[in-house]
Image: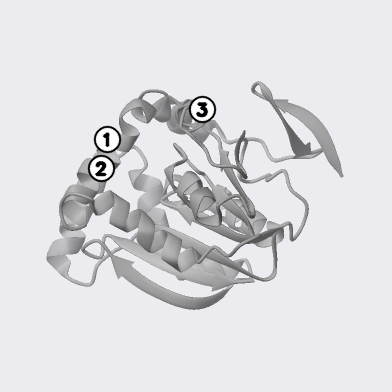
């Protein structure tokens, strides 16, 4: 049963017996993004300058994700853990007002950045916990989770994936992009070294241990296609409900 609740200055929906947001978020996630949100977009630009072929690397990376999502006129798409909203807005532009794109983000700081960007018709953002997505079963045609699962403790990660399964219609698609462990040892060591400076390192290691495709299949999705990109730093997975 759904009930109406206040989410910051906006109105959202939550379940009566919604799960508590773990102390992990209060201690690490929200605190981290309170300051990191201000440099997040420039940081991503610099990261993909090195990982994805020089200038314009971040744009090419986003375009690749959009190709995998393959948005079609009239579709409803959910961007889970939408961050500063760049991908959400690109998807909205691709639909050109013929569908609906929603970004859900837990961090108020990240959400403020997203809300400050120019948005096309049909794009909206809500503040909320992706363990408890405020939409009815099978509401969306597609969903995307980009670089967020490695930030989450195992139980939370699985709750988020279960919610993603719930809100996608039968036959609908999900695209998930996450850090990857390359086969080449020197690459794996380099990426592990890079991630050690990240406060999310323990949850990143746990996701690698469990395996991204294993976690996706665990909640019921069928894996259609997988690939790696950006020096094999990222794995991209297309699943179907």
The residue that label 2 is drawn on is: 45
Q: Quarter holding the C terminus?
A: bottom right
x and y, in percent, of residue 10 in the image: 68, 26
**How far is disc 3 from disc 2 in space, using C-alphas?**
27 Å
The residue that label 3 is drawn on is: 26
Disc on the earlier residue, 3 or 2? 3
Q: Nearer the viewer, residue 105 or 190?
A: 105
Asked whether residue 100 is in view, the answer is: yes
How packed mark 2 is, by other alpha carbons closer than 10 Å (few <14, some 14-19, many 20 or more), is: some
Between tags 1 and 3, which lies in front?
A: 1
Q: Is residue 207 left or right of residue 120?
A: left
| Label 3 with label 2: CB-CB less than 8 Å | no
**How far is disc 1 from disc 3 in space, using C-alphas?**
25 Å
| Label 1 with label 3: CB-CB less than 8 Å | no
Q: Residue furthest left?
A: 186
Picture residue at 36% right of the left edge, 65% below the top? 235
| Label 2 with label 1: CB-CB less than 8 Å | yes
Picture residue at 44% right of the left edge, 60% below the top? 66
Disc on the earlier residue, 1 or 3? 3
Q: Nearer the viewer, residue 117 or 193?
A: 117
Picture residue at 22% right of the left edge, 46% below the top? 47
How packed mark 1 is, by other alpha carbons closer than 10 Å (few <14, some 14-19, many 20 or more), is: few
Between tags 3 and 2, which lies in front?
A: 2
Which type of secondary structure does the marked residue at label 3 adopt? helix
Which type of secondary structure does the marked residue at label 1 adopt? helix
Q: Nearer the viewer, residue 72 or 138?
A: 72
Q: Quadrant of residue 86?
A: top left
**How far is disc 2 from disc 1 in space, using C-alphas?**
5 Å
How packed mark 3 is, by other alpha carbons closer than 10 Å (few <14, some 14-19, many 20 or more), is: few
The residue that label 1 is drawn on is: 42
């Amino acid at each position: 049963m759904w009930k109406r609740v206040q989410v910051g200055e906006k109105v959202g929906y939550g379940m009566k017996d919604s799960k508590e947001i773990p102390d992990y978020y209060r201690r690490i996630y929200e605190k981290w993004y309170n300051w990191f949100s201000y440099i997040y977009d420039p940081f991503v630009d610099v990261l993909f300058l090195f990982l994805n072929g020089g200038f314009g690397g971040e744009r090419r990376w986003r375009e690749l994700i959009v190709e995998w999502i393959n948005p079609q006129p009239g579709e409803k798409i959910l961007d889970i853990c939408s961050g500063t909203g760049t991908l959400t807005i690109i998807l909205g532009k691709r639909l050109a007002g013929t569908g609906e794109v929603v970004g859900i983000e837990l961090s108020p700081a990240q959400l403020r950045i997203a809300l400050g960007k120019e948005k096309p018709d049909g794009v909206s953002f809500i503040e909320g916990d992706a363990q408890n997505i405020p939409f009815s079963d099978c509401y969306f045609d597609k969903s995307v989770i980009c670089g967020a699962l490695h930030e989450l403790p195992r139980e939370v990660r699985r709750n988020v994936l279960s919610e993603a399964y719930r809100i996608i219609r039968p036959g609908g698609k999900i695209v998930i992009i996450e850090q990857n462990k390359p086969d080449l040892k020197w690459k794996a060591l380099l990426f592990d070294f890079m991630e050690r400076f990240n406060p999310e390192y323990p949850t990143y290691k746990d996701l690698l241990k469990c395996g991204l495709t294993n976690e996706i299949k665990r909640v019921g999705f069928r894996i259609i296609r997988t690939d790696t990109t950006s020096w094999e730093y990222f794995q991209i997975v297309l699943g179907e409900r």
